[in-house]
Image (cartoon, helix red, strand yellow):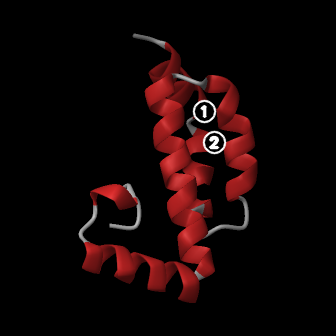
Amino acid sequence: MMTDRRDHLSRADTVTVAAIADGVPALDFAAKLITQFQATIRAKAITELDPWLAATETSLIAAFARGIARDRDAVQAAITEP
């Protein structure tokens, strides 16, 4: 629910997500980073990967991002190849 576009959520879910975002900013930031990663993959925007990895270093998804960095060649191929 945190990574869904808010215009696709019910009013109750939108209120819930807003309360979580206000109460747990680190979780809100992590959700935004996940959304950015999804957009990078969909747009095949390999130039966005390194800035995204840097932004994740102290986030709740740092371990996930370290895995992406370790498998960078495979991730780059997945993003750039058809």
The residue singled out by tag 2 in the image is: 69
46 above or below 64? Answer: above
Q: Give the image location of residue 59, x and y in percent.
A: 65, 67
48 above or below 20? Answer: above
Q: Give the image location of residue 56, x and y in percent.
A: 67, 57
* Labelled disc at residue 57: none
Residue drawn at (28%, 64%), measured in percent from left and top?
9
71 above or below 63? Answer: above
Residue drawn at (40%, 76%), measured in percent from left and top?
17
The answer to whether residue 20 is left or right of residue 9 is right
Give the distance between the C-alpha atoms of the residues marked 1 and 2, in whole angstroms.
5 Å
How many numbered marks appear?
2
The answer to whether residue 7 is left or right of residue 33 is left
68 above or below 34? Answer: above
Type of amino acid under label 2: Ala
Q: State the residue in front, 16 or 77.
A: 16
What quarter of the picture does the N terminus occupy? bottom left
In what element is the residue under mark 1? helix
Q: Give the image location of residue 46, x and y in percent.
A: 62, 24
Type of amino acid under label 1: Arg
Mark 1 neighbour class, 10 Å CA radius: few under 14, some 14 to 19, many 20 or more: some
**Seen from this angle, which residue lies furthest top?**
82
In what element is the residue under mark 2? helix
* Labelled disc at residue 72: 1
Mark 2 neighbour class, 10 Å CA radius: few under 14, some 14 to 19, many 20 or more: some
Residues under numbered marks 1 and 2 in contact, where contact means CB atoms less than 8 Å apart: yes
Residue drawn at (55%, 58%), measured in percent from left and top?
32
**Quarter occupied by residue 25:** bottom right
**Quarter occupied by residue 28:** bottom right
Asked if residue 4 can be seen in this view, the reply is no
